[in-house]
Image (tube, helix red, strand yellow):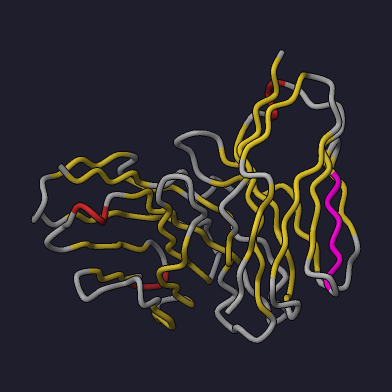
Amino acid sequence: DTGVSQNPRHKITKRGQNVTFRCDPISEHNRLYWYRQTLGQGPEFLTYFQNEAQLEKSRLLSDRFSAERPKGSFSTLEIQRTEQGDSAMYLCASSLEPSDGNQPQHFGDGTRLSIL
Amino acid sequence: KQEVTQIPAALSVPEGENLVLNCSFTDSAIYNLQWFRQDPGKGLTSLLLIQSSQREQTSGRLNASLDKSSGRSTLYIAASQPGDSATYLCAVRLRMDSSYKLIFGSGTRLLVRP
């Protein structure tokens, strides 16, 4: 169990550029979640995958955001035409979910995005 | 809409003190409540998960309690140490939400002074 891995750890880019983050979940975990955390706040849900299917997207996820999880393994989160308000920590979490919903989510160290 | 509130927002205590962090939530129909620790610039480390049918969970110097009917949870840290300094977040998972997404409070920033 190597934990949830996120890359890059930090990303600094100019406003208007596109960025892509990667998350490698714990192997065999069927659920993968993306959250966004701004300074002084708790994480907020963005979207999640059950295997390769994206089953829910928050209204926080504007049409500039897209996420994929090909083959149900790693996931990518892309932000197009970045804006100042996109500056945040983007956290990925994974879990192994049977039907009772009582499995903990395991988080990666996040990708900190700074928009200049 | 589920809201999760953590009080206090920040806490500074001398080393060795026992302390209590509070978490409240508005919708009592939860699957479970989870306490996390977050160090500056890092991700979240899960500390304790309390299922809705449970009243408390313990791990080392940490004890978390859950009173679902009143919408409250507390995290008790015994004999605090400087290494406990971090932000502590609580999060709930709603029973009627099949996504099992977590709804977080804003956290309590803890500083344990040597």
> Between residues A12 and A102, which one lies in front from this camera angle?
A12
Residue B92: x and y in percent read: 66, 67
Taking the image as shown, residue B94 lies to the left or right of residue A94, namely right
Residue B37: x and y in percent read: 63, 42
Name the residue at 47% across, 63% down. Answer: A44
> Between residues A105 and B5, which one lies in front from this camera angle?
B5
Quadrant position of residue A47:
bottom left
Q: How many marks?
A: 0
Prevailing SS of the magenta stretch: strand
Residue A50: x and y in percent read: 48, 77
Image: A20 above or below A10: below
Q: Residue furthest bottom?
A: B96
Name the residue at 34% across, 50% down. Answer: A88
User: Is B65 included in the stretch rendered in magenta?
Assistant: yes
Image: B48 above or below B1: above
Q: Residue furthest right?
A: B55
> Between residues B8 and B52, which one lies in front from this camera angle?
B8
Quadrant in which the C terminus of chain A is drawn: top left
Image: B82 above or below A49: above
Give the residues in magenta. Answer: B63-68
Name the residue at 39% across, 48% down. Answer: A6
Residue A90: x and y in percent read: 38, 53
Quadrant position of residue B79:
top right
User: Is A27 included in the stretch rendered in magenta?
Assistant: no
Taking the image as shown, residue B109 lies to the left or right of residue A74, namely right
Q: Residue furthest top?
A: B114
Taking the image as shown, residue A103 lies to the left or right of residue A59, namely right
